[in-house]
């Protein structure tokens, strides 16, 4: 075999790279000689991936439920990867608006995919089977998805995540304010028992597992969540496209996804006689609709009228009111 000058150059570059770290290139070439070729199934851990579904009942549709949740969590992971990059940027320089738009577009594409595919939940499972296997999963609920909460915390500050009854009434400027108001974060008002208003076990277990971590994240991102960057002018840079993407993100996460998700609750849990208890009899009917929660990541980007009507038309159509 002829060692071409191209290969020679690569060997020299490799020699340089390894010797800079005090390594002997020859030994690494030996390793290369003995190692296996990479396969697709090893690279994506196919066997492991396909072994991660462990239904708790005999009903085949439970697999659809598990896999679609797993797919959603993987998309959430991709969203967080982009959000981490944006929020981790250096404040001394202006944010690179082109890169930020690219990242926001990616996040919006992930959420669009989730919104469009939610029919897999709404129409894709047999209701009889769902109602049976769901009971074997108590008190677990998608409500306990910590990645969902982390996306919100990257997007905006605690002031916009407070329960709507106290939103706008407290100032959150210092770290102590975050600690003091954490119990007013909106999701602590979800997963409460409809009849007594008490926290469900679902919520208590989530708090035990994640409160400290989420409180830490709120504090860490106080001055670099997306809304803060927007308000401080780091994202504007005269670029309307960023605002357009932020608004799309707001709608996708706070109206479109909650709505398709809500539709699944209506399809499986609403009944003419008496709504079927969700995770231990929660207040899902009052809690889930986006119009009731009015979660808005970037309030300054919307008019008062738009905020007043947040998610309204959608809820009405989901409930068959229009
Ligand atoms: C048939 C499908 C589904 C039904 C019937 C359903 C039902 C519910 C209900 C009733 C709640 C309120 C809390 C509770 O009672 O547990 C809830 C919360 C939640 N679920 Fe689902 N869910 C479904 C699918 C999913 C999927 C695929 C995900 C993806 C991770 C998910 C994520 C969530 C999240 C993040 C919350 C909290 C929402 C918030 O705080 O606003 N759910 N779900």
Image: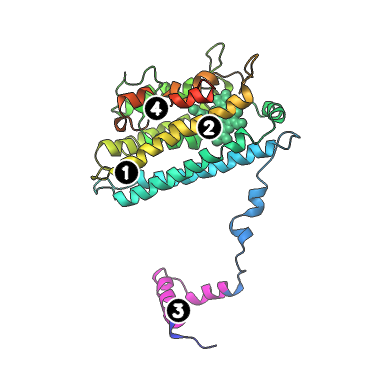
Write down the residue under mark 1. 242
Write down the residue under mark 3. 11
Q: Between tags 4 and 2, which lies in front?
A: 2
Q: How is the image coloured?
A: rainbow
Q: Between tags 3 and 4, which lies in front?
A: 4
Q: Residue furthest top?
A: 196
Which secondary structure lies at badge 4? loop
Q: Nearer the viewer, residue 68 or 218?
A: 68
Which secondary structure lies at badge 3? helix
Q: Residue furthest front?
A: 322
Residue 92 in the image: above or below residue 196:
below
The magenta stretch spans which residues? 7-32
Q: Nearer the viewer, residue 303 or 210?
A: 303
Q: Quadrant of ligand 1?
A: top right
Dot 1, crowdedness within 10 Å: few (<14), some or many (≥20)? Answer: many
Q: Residue at x 40, y 43 (%)?
A: 83
Write down the residue under mark 2. 260
């Amino acid at each position: 075999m002829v060692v071409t000058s191209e290969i020679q150059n690569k060997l020299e570059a490799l020699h340089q790279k390894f010797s800079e770290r005090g390594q002997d290139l020859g030994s690494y070439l030996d390793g290369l000689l003995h190692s296996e070729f990479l396969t697709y199934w090893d690279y994506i851990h196919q066997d492991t991936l396909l072994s991660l579904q462990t239904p708790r009942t005999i009903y085949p549709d439970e697999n659809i439920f598990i896999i679609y949740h797993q797919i959603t969590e993987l998309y959430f992971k991709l969203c967080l990867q982009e959000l981490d990059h944006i929020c981790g940027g250096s404040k001394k320089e202006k944010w690179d608006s082109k890169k930020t738009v690219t990242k926001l577009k990616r996040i919006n594409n992930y959420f669009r995919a989730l919104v469009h595919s939610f029919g897999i939940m709404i129409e894709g499972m047999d209701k009889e089977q769902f109602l049976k296997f769901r009971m074997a999963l108590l008190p677990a609920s998608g409500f306990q998805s910590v990645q969902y909460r982390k996306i919100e915390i990257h997007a905006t500050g605690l002031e916009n995540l407070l329960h709507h009854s106290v939103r706008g009434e407290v100032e959150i400027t210092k770290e102590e304010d975050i600690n003091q108001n954490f119990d007013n974060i909106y999701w602590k008002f979800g997963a409460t028992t409809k009849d007594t208003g008490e926290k469900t076990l679902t919520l208590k277990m989530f708090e035990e597992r994640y409160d400290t971590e989420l409180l830490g994240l709120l504090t860490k991102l106080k001055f670099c969540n997306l809304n803060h960057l927007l308000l401080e002018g780091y994202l504007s840079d005269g670029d309307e496209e960023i605002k357009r993407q932020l608004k799309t993100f707001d709608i996708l996460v706070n109206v479109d996804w909650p709505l398709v998700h809500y539709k699944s609750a209506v399809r499986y849990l609403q009944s003419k006689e008496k709504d079927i208890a969700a995770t231990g009899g929660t207040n899902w009917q009052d809690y889930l609709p986006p119009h009731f929660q009015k979660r808005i990541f970037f309030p300054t980007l919307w008019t008062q009228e738009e905020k007043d009507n947040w998610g309204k038309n959608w809820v009405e159509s989901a409930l068959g009111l229009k």
